[in-house]
Image (spheres, rainbow, N blue to C red):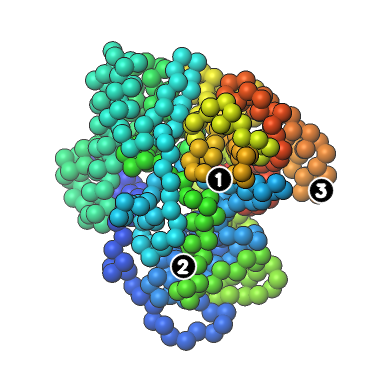
């Protein structure tokens, strides 16, 4: 019994701190005193301008707190940024699809920040297309019933299991909304009755949740097609972590911001600056300043000191606690715990600018495609971890099919992406950061050409001869621009 009580206590602690606020009541938050502060004195100092850091800063500013964001890069946004290349091409670093709020028939609502109105989100024609050796499925946009019927058509013997699995996902999302609304005021004695789906799933993996409902291996792979968004195979992925965002994505739809992800980041910066906050670019934080075990400010690489009532790090956790904070016995246990965590996969991306409109020429209409060579996700994860681009799954993103004018007239912009482990690239790390990139460039070109060839043979005949611009991003690129430990795009597993 004691073990179960401990489990439940950990469970409620996890949810209080882990569930995002689904409906923000700004009136319940404190407001700033607006008292005069020195130029380098702030209520909140935030390290890093990824979307987490920017939205956090915007929240402080919205409540009248004097807020500072410090970013080492020359543009804000972290992975939600763009870069330009000759020929008029503009490439999105990472964002592929997201949900977005709707008002007056227009999807321009960023939840929590109704004042931001200048980012319009365009829906995908289909939510995504997933391709397997025996199946080619286009998942409908905001029509989960049709998607369920597609699955039943292919797997009629699994009809009830399919329906039950999607009911589980809906139930988990519903229970989490109830839990969030309760704001931690939960009667744990009634937990199994009040939150039956959470109680049944909180200590299960996504693989275990599927196993209880469906048996067909191919079907399991298809309903887990979005595992790459979360970075772990079903056997290691928390059921809640897959079920909640996936059901939300299926029900609410997928959207892409007109003007690319940089539009979102810039909108947050504008909001912060309009509300008396500051965003300083090209300003690397070197140290978090600690006194009596509490952070009171930061020191930048150029020697400037900024103080704050709170200091928040949107830098990766490993560097925050190993580099920015002085090691002492006070965080010894935390570092020990952290040393047992494994780091998520990184990414390998090929950005292509085509000199002609190949997409219209071959009649390709999809925007978000996931290609899989088989149904064994454990093997797919292993191939990604080992950087085996000959067989690993990949994503193909073509946003010229979302809105006209995405690319220069008569041209196309294409992104090929696959997940990758860092170990393969570790051999090039020292030379890469010392400027000796010969062997590194040869290897990334080899991998990129393999992926281009695979896409050409399966989807876009004539692709290789249509390329005007080719850029390649590796796990080492991720480290260079984001600082993320081992180039991880999801932090800890």
User: In this orientation, which residue lies closer to the viewer: 467 or 30?
Assistant: 467
The mark closer to the camera, 2 or 1, is 1
Q: How far is disc 2 from disc 1 in space, using C-alphas?
A: 25 Å
What is the distance, in whole Å, between disc 3 and disc 2 at their CAs? Answer: 38 Å
Which element carries disc 1, helix, strand or loop? loop
- Point out the residue furthest to the bottom here: 36
Q: Is residue 19 visible?
A: yes
At mark 3, the secondary structure is: loop
Name the disc covering residue 435, or none.
Answer: 3
Residue underneath mark 2? 271
- Residue drawn at (21%, 52%), measured in percent from left and top? 186
Q: Are marks 1 and 3 in contact (CB under 8 Å)?
A: no
**Where in the figure is residue 116, as x and y percent of width and height?**
41, 63
The image position of residue 237, as x and y in percent, is 43, 34
From the top left corner, tell me how far across and down residue 320 is, in percent: 57, 57
Asked if residue 49 is positioned above or below residue 305 in the image, the reply reads above
- Specify few, some or many for label 1: CA neighbours under 10 Å numbering under 14, 14-19, or 20 or more: many
Mark 3 or mark 2, whichever is nearer to me:
2
Of marks 2 and 1, which one's residue comes earlier in the chain? 2
Q: Which residue is mark 1?
A: 406
Q: Which mark is residue 81?
A: none
């Amino acid at each position: 019994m004691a073990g179960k009580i401990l489990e439940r206590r950990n469970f409620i602690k996890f949810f209080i701190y882990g569930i995002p606020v689904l409906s923000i009541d700004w009136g319940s938050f404190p407001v700033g005193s607006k008292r005069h502060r020195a130029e380098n004195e702030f209520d909140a100092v935030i390290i890093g301008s990824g979307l987490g850091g920017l939205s956090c800063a915007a929240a402080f500013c919205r409540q009248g707190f004097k807020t500072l964001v410090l970013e080492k890069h020359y543009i804000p946004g972290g992975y939600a940024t763009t870069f330009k290349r000759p020929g008029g091409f503009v490439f999105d670093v990472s964002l592929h699809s997201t949900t977005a709020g709707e008002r007056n028939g227009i999807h321009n609502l960023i939840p929590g920040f109704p004042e931001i109105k200048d980012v319009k989100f365009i829906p995908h024609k289909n939510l995504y297309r997933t391709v397997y050796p025996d199946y080619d499925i286009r998942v409908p946009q905001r029509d989960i019933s049709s998607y369920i019927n597609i699955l039943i058509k292919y797997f009629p013997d699994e009809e009830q299991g399919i329906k039950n699995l999607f009911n589980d996902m809906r139930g988990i999302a519903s229970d989490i909304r109830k839990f969030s609304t309760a704001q931690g005021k939960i009667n744990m004695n009634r937990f199994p009755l009040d939150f039956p789906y959470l109680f049944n799933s909180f200590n299960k993996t996504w693989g275990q949740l599927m196993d209880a409902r469906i048996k067909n291996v191919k079907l399991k792979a298809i309903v887990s097609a979005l595992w790459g968004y979360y970075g772990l195979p079903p056997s290691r992925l928390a059921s809640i972590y897959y079920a909640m965002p996936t059901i939300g994505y299926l029900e609410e739809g997928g959207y892409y911001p007109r003007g690319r992800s940089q539009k979102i980041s810039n909108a947050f910066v504008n909001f912060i600056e309009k509300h008396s906050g500051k965003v300083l670019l090209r300003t690397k934080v070197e140290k978090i300043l600690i006194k009596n075990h509490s952070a009171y400010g930061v020191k930048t690489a150029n020697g400037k000191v900024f103080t704050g009532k709170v200091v928040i790090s949107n830098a990766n956790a490993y560097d925050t606690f190993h580099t920015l904070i002085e090691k002492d016995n006070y965080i010894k246990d935390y570092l020990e715990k952290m040393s047992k965590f494994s780091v998520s996969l990184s990414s390998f991306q090929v950005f292509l600018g085509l000199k002609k409109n190949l997409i219209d020429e071959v009649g390709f209409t999809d925007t978000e495609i996931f290609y899989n060579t088989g149904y064994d996700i454990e093997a797919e994860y292993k191939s990604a971890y080992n950087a085996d681009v000959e067989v690993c799954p990949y994503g193909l993103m073509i946003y010229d099919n979302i809105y006209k004018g995405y690319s220069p007239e008569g041209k196309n912009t294409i992104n090929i992406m696959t997940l990758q482990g860092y170990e393969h690239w570790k051999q090039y790390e020292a030379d890469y950061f010392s400027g000796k990139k010969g062997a590194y460039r040869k290897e990334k070109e080899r991998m990129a050409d393999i992926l281009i060839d695979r896409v050409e043979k399966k989807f876009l005949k004539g692709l290789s001869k249509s390329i005007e611009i080719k850029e390649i991003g590796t796990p080492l690129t991720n480290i260079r621009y984001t600082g993320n430990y081992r180039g991880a795009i999801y932090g800890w597993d």
